[in-house]
Image (cartoon, helix red, strand yellow):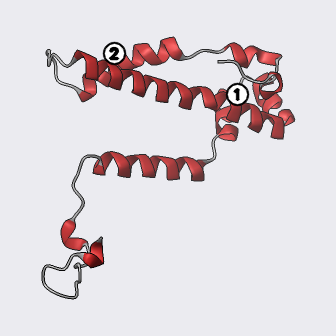
């Protein structure tokens, strides 16, 4: 991907960082075995398309983090530099992480994962009212 020159600082080589090999290895070695059964379902085409969509989404999410980190660094360069000079990686992560936002994101992800593929509870929907029996005009 080509980004505008001023989007990432030229210092530190952040624009050259590419996590895709790491993502692919983790996806193959950790994620796929944890969400699928061993064996061959012969669904190669649809599986490849799904794998590509997931890997692209993960890559975008991870690499957008470079821009977020750069933006946060620019808001407090002295604070970050002090932690970097001290070798305090945990301190840098604490400064980077907005725990309130992070918790909201994790809560949303858990909710989506827990409800994915489930039918909505139709019993909780309000009844459809019509003027006469068999009249569907109120829902069209």
Spot occupied by residue 11 in the image (x, y as percentages of width and height): 82, 17
Q: Residue at x 70, y 18 (%)?
A: 2
Horizontal side, residue 58 vs residue 51: left or right: right
Q: How many marks?
A: 2
In terms of depth relative to the viewer, which is nearer, 87 or 21?
A: 21
Are dots 2 and 1 in contact, CB under 8 Å? no
Q: Nearer the viewer, mark 2 or mark 1?
A: 2
Residue 45's mark? none
Q: Give the crowd class for mark 1: few <14, some 14-19, many >=20 residues within 10 Å.
A: few
- The kind of secondary structure element at disc 2 is helix
Q: Give the crowd class for mark 2: few <14, some 14-19, many >=20 residues within 10 Å.
A: few
Q: CA distance from mark 2 to mark 1?
A: 30 Å
Task: Relative to 42, say whether 62 is above or below.
Answer: below
Task: Specify which label sits upstream in the sequence, 2 or 1.
Answer: 2
Spot occupied by residue 105 in the image (x, y as percentages of width and height): 50, 48
Spot occupied by residue 64 in the image (x, y as percentages of width and height): 62, 31
Horizontal side, residue 99 vs residue 117: left or right: right
Q: Residue furthest bottom?
A: 131
Q: Residue at x 27, y 23 (%)?
A: 46
Report the residue marked by disc 1.
88
Q: Residue at x 68, y 38 (%)?
A: 96
Report the residue marked by disc 2.
29
Spot occupied by residue 50 in the image (x, y as percentages of width and height): 34, 26
Q: Residue at x 14, y 19 (%)?
A: 41
Q: Quadrant of the C terminus?
A: bottom left
Task: Relative to 18, say whether 36 is above or below.
Answer: below
- The kind of secondary structure element at disc 1 is loop
Dividing the picture into quarters, in which one does residue 124 lie? bottom left
Dividing the picture into quarters, in which one does residue 133 lie? bottom left
Task: Relative to 68, say whether 121 is above or below.
Answer: below
Q: Quadrant of the N terminus?
A: top right
């Amino acid at each position: 991907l080509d980004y505008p020159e001023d989007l990432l600082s030229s210092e530190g080589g952040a624009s050259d960082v590419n996590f895709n090999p790491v993502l692919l290895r983790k996806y193959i070695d950790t994620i796929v075995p944890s969400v699928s059964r061993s064996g061959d379902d012969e669904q190669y085409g649809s599986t490849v398309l799904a794998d590509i969509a997931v890997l692209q989404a993960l890559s975008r999410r991870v690499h957008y983090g470079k821009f977020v980190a750069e933006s946060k660094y620019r808001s407090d360069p002295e604070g970050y530099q002090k932690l970097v000079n001290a070798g305090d990686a945990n301190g840098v992560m604490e400064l980077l992480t907005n725990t309130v936002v992070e918790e909201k994101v994790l809560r949303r992800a858990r909710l989506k994962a827990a409800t994915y593929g489930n039918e909505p509870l139709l019993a909780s929907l309000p009844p459809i009212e019509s003027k006469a029996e068999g009249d569907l005009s109120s829902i069209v």
